[in-house]
Amino acid sequence: MRIACKTYRQIAAELGYASEQQAYEVVREEMAKAVREPVATLREQELQRLNVMLGALWANIEAGNQGAIQTGLRVMERRAKLLGMDAPIDYRVVREEAQRLADELGLDRKEVMAEAEAIIRSSGGA
């Protein structure tokens, strides 16, 4: 219920606990158990949540709703990240390509490389 953003007051009311504090303690105990679950189980649960989210958006995505499309893309990005589907960027290749393009276009190599390094740093690359 906490995963579904229910408050401790709502949890207490729905499950018949005497207080928010009692609901909090029960949730904390259950969350501690969940942490010990195998990573594969937790990953599968997360994938199921992502499927539900994408499914809820799908009709609006097909209708061309730009907000739904953007949200759907974020869900898909999260899935790809969770599953390790995105190949890592080889920044060595990026640097080599920047140098090649600078030479080919007759641009100042130092300026192009400085700009390339700034872009790499801003993207979290090394």
Image (spheres, rainbow, N blue to C red):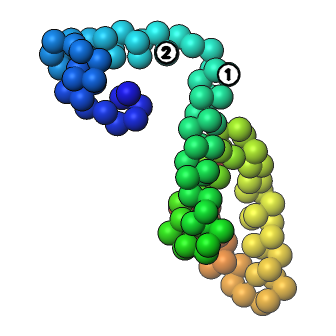
Q: Is residue 41 left or right of residue 106?
A: left
Quick one: SS at disc 2?
helix
In this view, the residue in front, 4 or 103, is 4
Residue at 83 percent of width and 76 percent of height: 100
Q: Are marks 1 and 2 in contact (CB under 8 Å)?
A: no
Residue at 57 percent of width and 13 percent of height: 37
Quadrant housing residue 45: top right
User: With respect to residue 70, does 115 lie above or below?
Assistant: below
- What's the mark number on residue 40? 1
Q: Is residue 104 left or right of residue 16?
A: right
Q: What residue type is disc 1 on?
A: Ala
Q: Residue furthest left?
A: 19
In this view, the residue in front, 33 or 16, is 16
Q: Position of residue 122 (x, y in %)?
A: 53, 61
Q: Is residue 103 left or right of residue 123?
A: right
Q: Quadrant of the N terminus?
A: top left
User: With respect to residue 96, does 56 lie above or below?
Assistant: above
Q: Position of residue 53 (x, y in %)?
A: 55, 48
Q: Position of residue 78 (x, y in %)?
A: 60, 47
Q: What residue type is disc 2 on?
A: Ala
Quadrant housing residue 21: top left
In this view, the residue in front, 23 or 99, is 23
* Residue 88 in view (yes/no): no
**Mark 2 burial class by Cα count in 10 Å: few <14, some 14-19, many 20+:** few
**Mark 1 burial class by Cα count in 10 Å: few <14, some 14-19, many 20+:** few
Quadrant housing residue 92: bottom right
Q: Position of residue 7 (x, y in %)?
A: 25, 31
Quick one: SS at disc 1?
helix
Q: Which residue lies under the disc numbered 2? A: 34
Residue at 79 percent of width and 89 percent of height: 105
The CA span between labels 1 and 2 is 12 Å
